[in-house]
Image (spheres, helix red, strand yellow):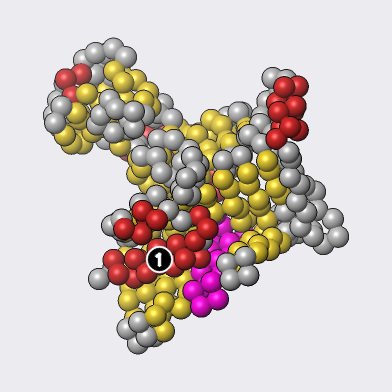
Amino acid sequence: MAYAPFLNFVILLLSTLSAYALESDRNQSVLVEADEVEIDFTNGKRIYTGNVSVRQGTIRIIADQIELFYDGEQLDHGVATGNPAVFRQRPDGKEHDVVGTGQTIELDEVNNIVTFITRAQLRQDRDAIEGEKIVYDMGRDRMIVRGGDEAPTRTTRAGEDATTVLKAKDNERPRMVLQPESSQSQNSATRTDSPDVATRNDTQIAFIGNNGAPVFSKRSVTSTSLGTLPKGTAARVLRSTDGWAEINSSRAVQVWVYGKFVSTISGIGVATGSNVRIRSTPSTGEESVILGELNTGQQVRVLATKGSWKKIEAPESIKVWTPSSRLELSNDMERWNKDWQAQTQSSSN
């Protein structure tokens, strides 16, 4: 019963962003995942809560909660919330996804409008626009971007190494800068090896926030999911870039190794080879990301087997990616060390 509302939800997104749609997406099956589904037949409200994920063709939606409101059998509007809520789709004939994010995404089926609210962003390849609120009106074929007191409107037209920040004035009125390709080429030619202004490379300490944190093999929601870290998990932030953080975690994520290099088929075992590659999926194909290595004698916990592969709890040295917004940075080193030690010990038991 949960699939029909989500199919309507995806159709809503397709109609609202029809300029970006892939025709093949409409014919794809819908995969929906949520921790809980609540349907109120008296008022036409359906609520999907907890690590909500929607896939259909090139479409991917991730949110903490999605609410759909129906007028009879007709979808009226929907609200997706998250930290942030994410919409991703591959445009027809393009090589890069369109990604929209916001703490709240409102979808108005009647008026054909989609609104991204609070730290809103629309991005495709090197082009991005940010603001406190982005309203895309398909009916009139126009976009309105509003800044806020703490989030001026910003437009970028470059790689990650050339973020253009627009300082707002006069009550944060939106402004937009479009850099021609010739300017981009010239800037690239004269660029030195100075650090990326959008990237932090200094190690920081943090805790996972109240909503938990999904972790991925790459800094993309379409890459392999490695699970969700619960709130309060101690994390070491190795670097931050483009809204993502690469971290080590005190609690183990689940990864794969080639089975013959681990001494047991279940429970605690040891690595029997050196430089044993740890992978995101039980495969050596291009989609399988190498996350790290095991060395001879290193102890691991085997969780499951699949063919010649074994799923294990990853050592704390494994580097994974999570949205930066899911982290709460901390200066309390004493508390962090205490929690890190307790959590790593708990994971190994």
Rendered location of residue 303, percent (x, y):
20, 36
- Residue located 19% across and 28% down the image: 309
Identify the residue at horizontal 68%, vertical 43% (top origin): 156
- Identify the image quadrant of the C terminus: top left
Q: Nearer the viewer, residue 196 or 175?
A: 175
Front one among 239 and 270: 239
Q: Which residues are magenta?
A: 101-118
Could you say which is closer to the camera, residue 309 or residue 272?
309
Q: Which residue is found at the position 32% from the left and 76% from the top?
A: 39
**Residue 73: within the magenta?**
no
Relative height, residue 31 to residue 314 (above, below): below
* Residue 59 horizontal/vertical position (percent): 41, 53
Instruction: Note whether residue 292 is visible.
Output: yes
Q: Secondary structure at mark 1?
A: helix
The quadrant in which residue 334 appears is top right
Q: Quadrant of residue 125?
A: top right
Left/right of residue 138 with respect to residue 249 in the rendered view: right
From where the camera sits, is residue 335 visible? no
Instruction: Name the residue tied to disc 1.
Output: 11
Name the amino acid, label 1: Ile
Rendered residue at 82%/62% (across/down): 171
Q: Is residue 258 above or below residue 95?
A: above
Q: Residues within 10 Å of mark 1 (few under 14, many from 20)?
A: some
Q: Quadrant of the N terminus?
A: bottom left
Magenta stretch: includes residue 103: yes
Q: Is residue 200 left or right of residue 9?
A: right
Q: Position of residue 63 (x, y in %)?
A: 44, 58
> Principal SS element in the magenta part?
strand
Q: Position of residue 121 (x, y in %)?
A: 60, 53
